[in-house]
Image: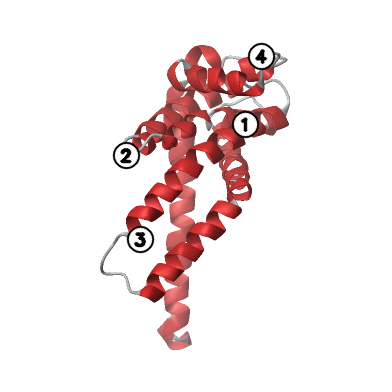
Amino acid sequence: MAWEGDRSEGWQRAWLTTVKEVSFAPARALRDVGTGDVRTALSFGGVSQCLGYLFYLPFHFGLVLMDPTLDPEQRSGVLSVAVILLLTLPFWVLLDMVLKALLMHPFLRLVGGAGDLQATVRASGYASGPHALYAIPCVGPLVGAALSIVSHIHAQKHAHGVSGPQVIVAWVLAVGVVVGALAASGVLGHLAALGPGAAP
């Protein structure tokens, strides 16, 4: 991938080329994603997501602020959230990539994956490339999200030496655990709110 090279023609060109590769030809571009420096992959994913969201979020919040039913206090709250989110965007982007990898890794190993955690994190970073397409108004988020899912499947497949269906099974298991944990937390919270007499 161009981002892994010396970037002699500038990081912008290397980044753009890599975004195109991982978005539209992930099977070829991500063959060696499991080997290399984690920081290189995370920096690529970070730049891609940040640039995509820097265009998408103002557009999204602008539409929310145009809602005529919002009162001044609500508009102020929405604007505050938008500013805080934009200022802390690099943190949330990095957290997103790392948490995805940490969540997926044990389930990828469970279905037969052979890659280590570093390979999983690298795959998560490079598979974030299509998020740059969020910068395209209206259709960008849908296209970027769809291509990112495809890139994630190819990236983890090559990083762990498994098949696409095995990656999908690992995803389903990971999502199931998260949903189950959230549901259990909600039930326990509800029972706690009702008081000790409500518990079976």
Mark 4 vs mark 1: in front: 4
Density class for disc 1 (Cα within 10 Å; few <14, some 14-19, many ≥20) is many
* Lower sequence index among marks 4 and 3: 4
- Whether residue 109 appears in this view of the structure is no
Amino acid type of disc 2? Cys
Name the foreground residue: 147 vs 114: 147
Q: Quadrant of residue 35?
A: top right
Name the foreground residue: 55 vs 6: 55
Numbered circle sitting on residue 138:
2
Amino acid type of disc 4? Glu
Residue located 35% across and 38% down the image: 137
Residue located 45% across and 69% down the image: 77
Query: Is 19 above or below relative to 65?
Result: above
Q: CA distance from mark 2 to mark 1?
A: 31 Å
Amino acid type of disc 3? Leu
In the structure shown, which secondary structural element does the residue marked by tag 4 occupy? loop
Name the foreground residue: 42 vs 118: 42
Read off the residue under disc 3: 65
In the structure shown, which secondary structural element does the residue marked by tag 3 occupy? helix
**Residue that lies at the very extreme toward the top in this rendered image:** 28
Is there a contact, CB below 8 Å, between mark 4 and mark 3? no
In the structure shown, which secondary structural element does the residue marked by tag 2 occupy? loop
Read off the residue under disc 1: 120
Residue located 39% across and 68% down the image: 75
